[in-house]
């Protein structure tokens, strides 16, 4: 059965899938997809590059997604030899034992070349998360068309945009919208985290990648210092994971904030539910915070040359997902040299002083939540079935 032709795999319980996620947010998306696929293919065998959430579904990680986690073009160049080596080894493994299906999870710069090669060899290829051609680097359209049989889109406007370029896509909703409750329970989250029920709590989310934390941890903690001087009763909570813990703890010691910040391993969703306001690195965490209906301030800082290159290719006035998806500058954004502790602190405190604006943004975020909630694992699995059948 392992050598059965692709066309006969639709009803095979032991479908063999190669899947690659290149960072922790992709690990979460892929894990949810794997859960949905296991319902259709109970003996599904999946391997490739993943993280702890994927591994918990039975996925076999030949490499950790953390080995690929970089932000910015220059950072990618610095680690090019290592990442290229992993990709070449992955490709060789796939050519030696072709899977029935390849699923790239985000990380289009890594996944598209692999998908293109496999597609030429007759392996169906699916991309989970459409490359953001609507935000920057629109020249990737041709690469997508050459590399991918189908794109699983997490935003509603993407399939129509892809169709204009002859690329098949399905809106499957954003899985985070399925996971997060429409009305998150702040009291329960605080109880679970051991946080006081009546305190005013600020969440600090400086990113899930080393390059993000390197640029944002210190200014975020310095902003917390500024806030604490103005409002001594504030409490701060910062979720992270073991890979980043040494960097975070060093930043806490350097800023003198070790005794003032409640450090949590993982559990970022509980932190977002528990807080009154959040200071967040641009990325998936901003959408998660929005779906928790919490006001926020977004910051983004990367290596200077990477920013110059990326900023010239940017097509939209915002970088934060809440602003992009709502098509409105609802959330303050601080970019590059604007990432200053006092500016960040003042912006966070303004939310605490403006309940009318908080209520308004919560309504917008509730509408966004309903729009994105679509049972991604089921819809994505159905789309994959059609790709395999074709």
Image: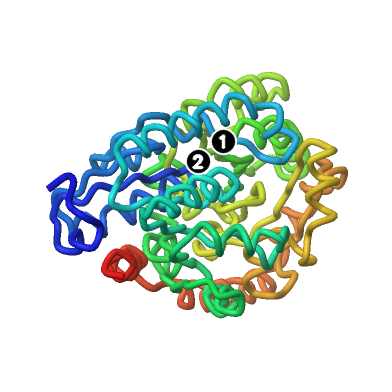
Residue 374 left/right relative to 297: left
The vertical placement of 163 against 204, above or below, is: below
Q: In the image, which disc is placed on residue 69? A: 1
Mark 2 or mark 1: whose residue is earlier in sequence: 2
Residue appearing at x 59%, y 50% in the figure: 200
| C-beta proximity under 8 Å, tags 2 and 1 | yes
- Residue 333 on image: x %, y %: 76, 57
Tally the marks: 2
Q: Nearer the viewer, residue 291 or 6?
A: 6
Q: Residue at x 55, y 43 (%)?
A: 110
- Would residue 332 be found to the left or right of residue 244 on screen? right
Density class for disc 2 (Cα within 10 Å; few <14, some 14-19, many ≥20) is many
Q: Nearer the viewer, residue 323 or 309?
A: 309
The location of residue 260, given as percent across then percent down, is 61, 31
Relative to the observer, which residue lies in front, 62 or 264?
A: 62
* Outermost residue, front side: 121
Disc 2/disc 1 C-alpha distance (Å)? 6 Å
Work out whether residue 161 can be spotted: yes
* Rendered location of residue 28, percent (x, y): 41, 48
Q: Which residue is mark 2?
A: 22
Foreground residue, 96 or 29?
96
Circle 2 — which element? loop
């Amino acid at each position: 059965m392992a050598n059965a032709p692709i066309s006969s795999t639709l009803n095979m319980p032991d479908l063999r899938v190669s899947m690659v996620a290149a960072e922790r947010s992709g690990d979460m998306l892929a894990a949810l997809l794997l859960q949905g696929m296991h319902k259709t293919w109970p003996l599904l065998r999946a391997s490739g590059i993943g993280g702890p959430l994927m591994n918990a579904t039975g996925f076999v990680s030949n490499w950790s997604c953390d080995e690929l986690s970089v932000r910015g073009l220059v950072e990618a160049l610095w680690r090019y030899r290592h990442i290229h080596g992993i990709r070449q080894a992955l490709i060789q493994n796939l050519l030696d034992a072709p899977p029935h299906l390849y699923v790239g999870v985000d990380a289009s710069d890594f996944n598209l070349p692999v998908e293109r090669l496999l597609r030429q060899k007759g392996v169906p290829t699916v991309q989970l998360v459409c490359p953001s051609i609507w935000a920057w680097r629109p020249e990737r359209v041709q690469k997508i068309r050459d590399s991918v049989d189908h794109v699983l889109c997490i935003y509603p406007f993407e399939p129509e945009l892809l169709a204009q370029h002859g690329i098949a896509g399905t809106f499957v909703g954003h899985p985070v919208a399925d996971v997060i409750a429409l009305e998150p329970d702040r009291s329960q989250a605080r109880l679970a985290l051991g946080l006081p029920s009546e305190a005013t709590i600020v969440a600090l989310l400086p990113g899930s990648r080393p390059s993000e934390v390197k640029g944002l941890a210190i200014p975020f903690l310095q902003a917390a210092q500024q806030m604490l001087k103005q409002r001594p009763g504030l409490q701060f909570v910062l979720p992270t994971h073991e890979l980043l813990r040494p960097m975070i703890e060093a930043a806490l010691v350097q800023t003198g904030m070790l005794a003032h910040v409640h450090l949590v391993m993982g559990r970022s969703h509980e932190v977002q539910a528990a807080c009154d306001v959040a200071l967040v690195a641009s990325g998936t965490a901003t959408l998660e915070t929005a779906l928790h209906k919490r006001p926020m301030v977004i910051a983004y800082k990367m290596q200077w040359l990477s920013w110059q290159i990326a900023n010239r290719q940017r097509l939209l006035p915002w970088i934060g997902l809440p602003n992009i998806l709502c098509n409105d500058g609802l959330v303050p954004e601080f970019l590059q040299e604007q990432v200053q502790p006092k500016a960040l602190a003042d912006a966070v405190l303004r939310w605490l002083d403006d309940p009318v604006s908080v209520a308004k943004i919560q309504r917008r975020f509730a509408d966004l939540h309903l729009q994105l909630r679509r049972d991604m694992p089921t819809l994505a699995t159905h789309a994959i079935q059609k790709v395999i059948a074709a």
